[in-house]
Image: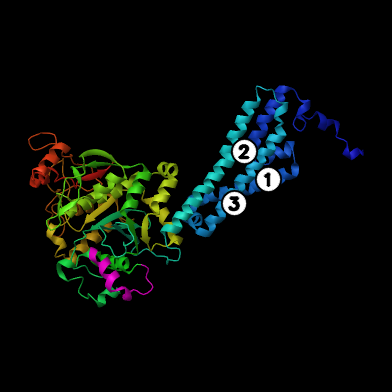
Amino acid sequence: MSNTELPSKGLLTDPVRNPASAPEPVRTRRAFLLILLTLFVPGSAQIVAGDRKLGRIALRVTLSVWVLAIIALVSLFTNRTLLISIVTNQIASLLIVLVLAALAVGWLVLFVNTLRLIRPVLLAPRMRPAVGIALALAMVLSSGSLGYAAYLLNVSRNAIGSIFNADGPAIDPVDGRYNFLMMGGDAGADRTGRRPDSLSVLSVDAESGKTAIISIPRNLQNARFSEGSPMLQVYPDGYDCGNDCLINAINTEVTNEHKDLYPGVADPGAQATLEAVSGTLGITVQAYVLVDMDGFAKLIDAMGGIRIKAGGWVPISGDMIDEANGIHGMPLGWIPAGEQKLDGFHALWYGRSREFVDDYARIQRQQCVQQAMLRQLDPATLLSKFEDIANAGTKVVDSNISASQLGSFVDLAMKAKGKEIGRLTIGPPDFDASFSTVPDFDVIHERVRKLLESQSSTSSPAAAGTDDAVLQPRNAGGGNGLSAAGPPLGLPATTPAPSPSSSDFTPVTTTPAGEPITEKMLNQLKREGNEQAIRELVATNGQCAPL
């Protein structure tokens, strides 16, 4: 044997590279040290005690990953939109998934190699289980976490691909705002052209994230189409064919009769509805999202439910037995007044039910549910229930939002988190109940303008508060009068009620005589056919505040 092949005396006595020569306590400490080195500086254990070539390769990869992680962290504070756009991009996210999976496998290989370097047979029998447990925990924390991150990112990219339009055009803010039309309807094979049950615009200031929700009653007549809408050829003076021309009928009519006016548009009915909402409100609505109600319920279940303060009892309606008069059979249940935590099924009914009240009470509850979802979807909930939330999100039936802009919109949502949300309903409590039949569009445009001004990045808190007092009738001290600012601009409201973002109301839980309202009492009145008494007892069920 040549001199170069003979191990040096130092190597034979080095306890790190030759643990057999070391006493038992040293071998134990060495084992834990190698595990920690592999956990915090992958490749360093191989450098000091094993295959140095493998260690050098692993260290280069480790340093590269650290550099990329530092760049990502800096971008999180300096250019968050770009970072989110990269993560949500279908190609970039696939590459990240593959890299994370490769890193997870590589880290696992290093731990297996570290186990070989430890040589458990040289450890004291009582220490072998402890070293094995420490190694397993380190593998879960490192390789397991990377693998799980790759899995979650893959779930996310699949959901994005299912929900959003990969080829959709990018949209720019108009007058400093992004305006999204949210439409809710039932799913099914024949859903295309269905009349949406709810219509609301989510308007977000592009700079500050200040948000307003504008609700349009489904029975609004004479809706105006925006300039440039193909439907102006059919209805140049608005959607004005009488009681059959409600705004929620546009989707069906265009889908069935005027698709040819929208060549190349994936959903002409939804696009025409967007144009009608734009013209009616006097703003440019850039995108729409059509949500399946069943998917809405699943999303709330995935979040773990929502918490609200309900102003009055809400029925879970039974089958319709008299469609002409809107009479249902016995309710399947009731959602009580007071503080409630609602699962998806009950939240869906809470926002959908309109038995014993009008559409406007339902609209107020829908706004409240939307705000509760926005307020309560915190990062901890999102991370802990990410897969369920992402899978439920694929129940969004249709959207023309481009996937390429998700980064900027997610960033916008983060800005909006925690900010007070402005509200306006084109009907009670902000307008008289008859207003939707003969709407004054100049008044609507002025009300919308004032609301959006109060929710702009340039408005001061004091100015926003003043506008809010004008725009929203409120209860003062639990009473039933309007605020000191007087009735809202336009026709006076007939049913004063607090904003869904406000909790300054007392839930009605007793009869005028002081008897507690119960499900048994309400059902008995229903059996007796005394629906008027029920209406009086549940008249405040439009009042709602997210908790």
Whole-number angstrom distance, CA of label 2 to CA of label 1: 12 Å
Look at mark 3 in the image and give the residue it sits on: 99
Q: Give the amino acid type for the residue marked by disc 1 in the picture.
A: Ala
User: Residue placed at 25% from the left, 51% from the top?
Assistant: 366
Q: Are marks 2 and 1 in contact (CB under 8 Å)?
A: no
Q: Nearer the viewer, mark 1 or mark 3?
A: 3
Q: Element under label 2?
A: helix
Q: Position of residue 388 (x, y in %)?
A: 42, 46
Type of amino acid under label 2: Phe
Q: Which residues are magenta?
A: 248-266
Earlier in the chain: of badge 2 and badge 1, it is: 2
Mark 3, Cα crowd under 10 Å, few <14 / some 14-19 / many 20+, is some
Question: What residue sits 17% from the left and 67% below the top?
Answer: 244
Q: Amino acid at mark 3?
A: Val
Tell me the number on the disc at residue 40: 2
Q: Is residue 437 visible?
A: yes
Residue drawn 33% across and 42% down? 305
